[in-house]
Image (tube, grey):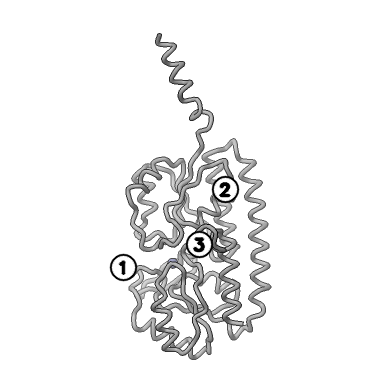
Amino acid sequence: MFFRSVLFLFVLNLPYLLFAQTVAVVSTTQIYDITKNIAGDDVKVLSILAPGQDPHTYSPVPADIEKVKSADIVIENGLHLEGKNWMKNLAADAKKPLVTASDGIVPLILEAHGEKINDPHAWFTPQNAAVYVNNITRALIRIDPEKKENFVMRAKLYLAQLRALDGWIKKEVSVIPPDRRVLVTNHDAFNYFAKEYGFVNTAPTGWSTGSEVGGGVTPERREKAVRSIKEMRVRTIFFETTINPKLIREIAADAGVRVGGSLYSDSMGDEGTPGETYIGMMRENVLKIVRGLK
Ligand SMILES: [Zn+2]
């Protein structure tokens, strides 16, 4: 009788035992896409943030706690992108191993209220995205070593696409005269991109979109943005998909310049938009920037 019950339970759970997948829970939409590219169907990848949500100001909800409980590994961006360390805290509360995708990147330094902080927006160069790929690949191998070859093969393919993306960006931005390479957006998301591709970057809000961490839009920052636009004879400025465009429209009006549409910054786009993948998001931004500034 006992044996039959055990057998019955075993048969009942067979589909689960056979098809149980390892689970990676990630914080942002960019990390979700990069992780999916390496994981394929071998690992179930779940994202805490949905397209359009802001990682700086996000507060976890009960469903996030459940997601993290199901995780074999938790992956964050790090560099304090996740405001008040919400992803670190979720992983610690659920006692799950945490991987920081930006580990090993030498961060750019930003000043906020006289305080120096590491710029969290490291994914904005394909070179840094490659560091994310390597860290995430190692993490996936750790939780599912039998699938190592699959992960390594997909990572190689994706790294080749990132190298192609870098070459394409260099070619595209080369049509913008160097003195017109000034990028004005809502917040300091584009410093890594700017440094890599020869742009000057200025943003009224500072490094974060959250007033509690970034100090909001101080009159000085706003004035500095208007002054830079005039001094550098910028013709087009941009807003960001996750942020209300009101401030950028006001600054554009004050400085007498055009608004060149929205760029993807801290989040990718919805399914079916050009920004639904990391590479698509980068391409779409570059096309808009080149159209606006050339
Ligand atoms: Zn940001």
Q: Quadrant of ligand 1?
A: bottom left
Direction top: furthest residue? 1
- Residue 137 is tagged as 2
Q: Are marks 2 and 1 in contact (CB under 8 Å)?
A: no
Q: Please rate how many residues cluster around mark 3, counting C-alpha atoms within 10 Å: few if below 14, some from 14 to 19, many from 20.
A: many
> Which residue occupies 51% across, 71% down?
263
- Is disc 3 placed on a helix, strand or loop? loop
In front: 166, or 254? Answer: 254
Q: Please rate how many residues cluster around mark 1, counting C-alpha atoms within 10 Å: few if below 14, some from 14 to 19, many from 20.
A: few
- How far apart in space, not on screen, are marks 2 and 1 (Cα)? 34 Å
Q: Please rate how many residues cluster around mark 2, counting C-alpha atoms within 10 Å: few if below 14, some from 14 to 19, many from 20.
A: many
- How far apart in space, not on screen, are marks 3 and 1 (Cα)? 25 Å
The label nearer to you, 3 versus 1, is: 3
Query: Is residue 260 something one can see in this rendering?
Result: yes
Residue 110: % across, % down: 44, 72
Earlier sequence position, callout 3 versus callout 1: 1
Residue 190 against residue 54 in the figure, above or below:
below
- Is disc 2 placed on a helix, strand or loop? helix
Residue 191 against residue 65 in the figure, above or below:
below
**Residue labelled with disc 3:** 269
